[in-house]
Image: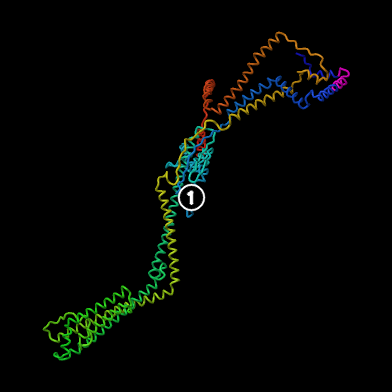
Amino acid sequence: MPVWVPRSMHEHSRMDVPGVEDQNRSRRNRQNQIASESRGAGLVDSPSLAGIRENISEAIRILALRRWYFLVPFCLGTVLATTTSHYLPRTYSASTTFERVDDDVLQNLPIRGTVGSFLPFRETFSRDIQSPEIMDEVATAFGLTEDLPKNPDGTLTPAAKEMRRRIGARLLRGVSAGVVSSRNYKDTLRLNYTGTTPTDAVQLLEAARDAYIRQTRVRITQRLQENKTYFEEEAAKRRTVVDALDREKIQREIESPTIDPTRADTIFIKLTSLKNEQRELERQRNTVQAKALKTRQYLGSIVTTSSLPPNSGMAVGLASVLKSPRAREIEAEINRIDTEIEELKIKRRMTDQHPEIVERRELRARYEGLLATEYGPVGPVPNQGLAREDTVGPDASMGDVWRAAKLRAEMDLVAYEDEQERIAGSLRLVGAEIKTLEAARDNVPAARAAYRDLQERLNHAREDYALYAQTAQRFALLLAADENERGIRFNVLGPTVAGTTPTNPKSKSVLVLALLIGVGAGVVFVLLAELFDRSYHTSKQVVQSLGVNILETIDEIVTSADRARRFRRKFLLAPAVTVLLLGAAGLSSSMAYLSLEQPATYERLMQKPRGMWQRWTGTREEVPDEHDRIAAHISRESLTAQAPG
């Protein structure tokens, strides 16, 4: 091995040797000339490539020379970085997925008078999870409210309720909600937990999910009940309107019974019918008047005849007429013809000019002529009432006969007068109704327009009432259903999945960062060692420092003791130290990887070392979980709340 000359000799050498500068200048010129010729002939590389190779060679030489300055910091830095990763806060995740199915009936239900759906229940999932009601239920589900201050009746005090809400907010701090997929009537929802402790993640997510389901059902029931009440009240109001319009319609129909918009000829038909009835009543009145007149004439003839002697011819003729069977038959036939004429006019609406009625009137006139012939000189034709069987016996005197005939004639006259009064009353009523219809006929367009408008308003009110009543019934059917089928159904799609592997930090990130820290530490120590080293290690350094060529180098003189010492250091100590350092780095990296990727395996491997350490130190370290930390926090808050002032 050559003997190195300290760099401090360089200054003295340059001062003691005469003409050194000239020799160096000439030598550099020759070297430059030779390099130029070589580059022109293509025998050497370009300056940039040569410089790169030279730098790489120099770096490799320095790294080989300073290998311990690199290896030791590299391993120690890696061990320190991977060991530190055990104390970094772990972030774990868990999730639960469930399905919310909205009934298609619920989607199209009117809400507070506007047609729509219960869409707000689908859009407020993230906000509902953080609602105060769910916070209270989650805190209660974890059993964290048992030690809170209570009233004598067992309920929480206002301060305890506020504390319970803060506890629930603390628990739900790492819970987030999102919609995985959304269809027409179905939403797939997911609750995610991100926190430092995975032990209570499953219970926390299930408690939040169950609380959301319960609160949503309560809100749905409350909303359904509110809408049912609203639509029932609106239906009752519209029912009142329908009844009022119906009463108004009936009143108008009573006041104007012929105002019917569906039949344009109602008044004309009614007027025609009333006029026919009026003519028939007039005919009946004329007939009764004629009969009454004949009866009066007959009654006058009876009075005149009764004053004659009993054996006169007039008295004998009257007695014979009163008992004539032929006269009774003719009067019966006349009555039958009158009845047929009345039926033809009433039932078949025939007029007096109809051939059948004209024919019957002619027949009646002939019968009247025959009846007059039967009575002879007595004159007027009596009423058919006189044709009844005489109540006077065969041995009665003529005075009794006259008195019986007079009594019958007076009775018939009274009946005719009563019939005239009845017909006159009917004529007055028919005449008044005809006048009313004729007056209404002039006001038909306006009356029918008002009636039609009333009918349209009534139909619209009935439709409106039917809509509100049916909607209220739909709400009632939903409320009558089971709670699980009350508009919204929830289906849990699987068990809550809680990952035992932390999501942060990542194992790859930790290992890469540890390697970078180790490499950085080794490079820094190598640079420091090279910077503060003032000795020569190569002949090139001597040439560059002194500026003279080296004629010969003398190797280091090594004794047997030096060789033995070098052998032990090179083949025993160096490998042992290298294996120890690399093993420590590899072991720490492996444990860091297991703690992140396989926590169960890591805990199983660390049980014995941790137990040995606890037995050796006589201590027992317990790491409180999230439940214990929150409980301790509750105790501190309870003491603070109960403190005076």
Which residue position holds label 1? 117
Q: Amino acid at mark 1?
A: Ser
Q: Is residue 645 visible?
A: no
Total marks in image: 1
Specify start and end residues of the magenta stretch as a single range. 15-28
| Disc 1 residue crowd, few under 14, some 14–19, many 20+, Cα 10 Å | some
Q: Is residue 167 above or below residue 563?
A: below
- Residue 412 position in % (x across, y down): 23, 81
Residue 37 quadrant: top right
In this figure, which colouring scheme has been used for the structure?
A: rainbow
Residue 421 highlighted magenta (yes or no): no
In the image: residue 461, left or right of residue 53: left
Q: Quadrant of residue 370?
A: bottom left
Q: Residue extending furthest left?
A: 395
- Residue 141: percent from the left, percent from the top? 46, 38
Q: Nearer the viewer, residue 135 or 18?
A: 18
Residue drawn where x is 30% and y is 75% of the image: 344
Name the residue rendered at 65%, 23% in the picture.
74
Q: Quadrant of residue 392?
A: bottom left
Q: Nearer the viewer, residue 314 or 137?
A: 314
Compared with 526, 555 (above or below) is above
